[in-house]
Image: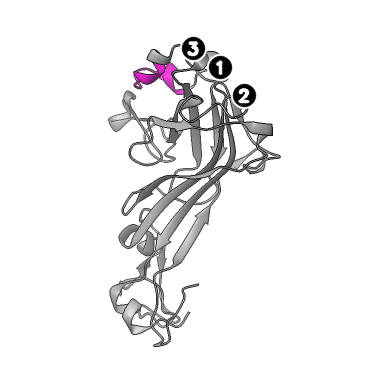
Amino acid sequence: MGVRNPYDKGYHPYTMEIEPWYNGGPCRRSNYPNISPRYTSGTDAENFVFNDSGDYSPAGCYVDLDLQWPGNTPWYARLFGQGGSSNQLNHTGDNSNGDDAATPFSQRYGVSVWMDLRVGNSAHPGYGTAKTYIAILRNSNGSHQGGSFWDAPGNVATYTSPRTMFGGFERIAVSGDNYGSGNYRGWSCVCQYQNANMPMNATTLRVINLGGPNNSAGLDLKIQGFKLIYHISPTWANRYGGMNL
């Protein structure tokens, strides 16, 4: 629900929180994947780019998470009023032909991604020592080769073009420690976007641990928390006209 000010006007803080699932539930201290690094060479990890099909499923070096909730792009669902096309129910959109169910996402939103990560297998290694590179990809049900994590325009597999969760997620550097298997929590904001799209038909996220510059220390990656938050704003007219929510 949105928060209202003393003048009965709508504020911004509408949010929708998404948690990808692993092993039947959200990632947490008692339910998390442990992902081995793909490369033992730091140089290989730092220079990695997606190039062929094998890059997307290195054995033991990736995990698939169930994205049970939709992405944030417009889709085919439409909402109408109580008895017709007018907006008696004060939907957040303003299309008289029926509100796009994703309107507040696709036109007036921000996205932030939060993760609780453990890097390496020892306590307190120091900033930058337990450092690895990860990729977070998505599928695209209904598209050409929709179960894959690469683009396939015209049904032609394009291995050099990964389907990333959001732009820039083909290689992210993260650093951290693994003290006491997570006695200390380490939530971090991986990204903040004013505008970013993830298709409604994404159902699986794939996290790949590429490795980092100090792989000899054992740079396993543990995901003990993962949240996507859509920060939503109503339309200009409704924001200042006061919606009845």
First in sequence, mark 1 or 2: give its number: 2
Say what amino acid the circle numbered 1 marks. Answer: Ala
- How far apart, in angstroms, are the residues tagged by discs 1 and 2? 7 Å
Q: Nearer the viewer, residue 168 or 184?
A: 184
Pointers 1 and 2 in contact (C-beta within 8 Å): yes
Say whether disc 1 or disc 3 marks the residue closer to the N-terminus: 3
Is 5 positioned to the left or the right of 49 in the image?
right
Eyeballing the image, is 199 above or below 82? above
Q: Residue furthest right?
A: 30
Mark 3 surroundings: few (<14), some (14-19) or many (≥20) residues within 10 A: some
Residue 179 locus on image (x, y percent): 64, 32
Point out residue 212 in the picture as x, y percentages from the top left corner: 45, 21
Q: Is residue 234 visible?
A: yes
Numbered label attached to residue 121: 2
| Extent of the magenta region | 44-56
Residue 178 image offset from top left, x and y in percent: 61, 31
Was residue 196 drawn as part of the magenta stretch in this picture? Answer: no
Label annotation for residue 217: 1
Disc 1 to disc 3: CB gap under 8 Å: no
Tell me the tag on residue 40: 3
**Local crowd size for mark 2, using a 10 Å CA cut-off: few (<14), some (14–19), many (≥20):** some
- Residue type, numbered disc 3: Thr
Q: Is residue 29 above or below residue 215?
A: below
